[in-house]
Amino acid sequence: MKWKKDAKEGTIVAGENRKGENLNQLSNPQKIVVNDLGHLYVADFENHRIMRWREGKEEGEVIVGGNDKGNQSNQFNDPCGLCFDDEGNLYVADYFNQRIQKFVTIL
């Protein structure tokens, strides 16, 4: 949701008020980051993926993960955190795999 000054209610910017695995849904979303372009990145915990929502879009994009739960380099087991460094590289905390993964520059 986003808020305007003196707003009484928010606007949904990602997800749709119920859990699911479609591109317009999240399942137990965790950490979020908004970049300088206004793109919203979400650690989608139970869907084992990192999603990106562009402002005004009703569906997100899977940018990494989403290949079922697992421990391969293209899989997560409940991602719970994310951040970007100054060069735009993405770091993901992978809860049950006990690891941090780095993904080079996501645009």
Image (cartoon, rainbow, N blue to C red):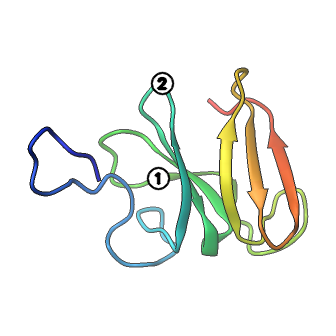
* Foreground disc of the pair 1, 2: 2
Please rate how many residues cluster around mark 2, counting C-alpha atoms within 10 Å: few if below 14, some from 14 to 19, many from 20.
few
The number of discs equals: 2
Residue at the extreme top: 87
Give the residue number, with chain letter if any, for mark 2: 36
As drawn, 49 above or below 89:
below
Q: Secondary structure at mark 2?
A: loop
Q: Is residue 90 above or below residue 28?
A: above
Residue labelled with disc 1: 60
On the image, the x and y values in percent for residue 19 come to 44, 78
Against 5, residue 1 (above or below) is below
Along the line of sight, which residue is nearer the eye, 94 or 60? 94
Residue depicted at 46% across the width and 37% down the height: 39
Image coordinates of residue 29 in percent, x first then y, are 52, 66
Q: Which amino acid type corresponds to the residue marked 2 in the rendered image?
A: Asp
Residue nearest the viewer, comparing 100 with 15: 100
Asked if residue 79 lies left or right of residue 11, the reply is: right
| In the foreground, 85 or 50 | 85
Taking the spot 77% from the left edge, 72% from the top edge, the residue there is: 77
* Residue for point 16% across, 40% down: 4
The reply to whether dot 1 and dot 2 touch (C-beta < 8 Å) is no
Residue 43 in percent (x, y) is at: 60, 58
SS at circle 1: loop
Q: Earlier in the sequence, mark 1 or mark 2?
A: 2
Looking at the rendered structure, which numbered label has been put on residue 28?
A: none
Q: Would you identify the image quadrant in which residue 12 lies?
A: bottom left
95 or 19: nearer the viewer = 95
**Which quadrant does the C terminus fall into?**
top right
- Quadrant of the rendered image containing residue 17: bottom left
Mark 1 vs mark 2, CA separation in Å:
17 Å
Q: Amino acid at mark 1?
A: Gly
Left or right, residue 62 beside residue 14: right
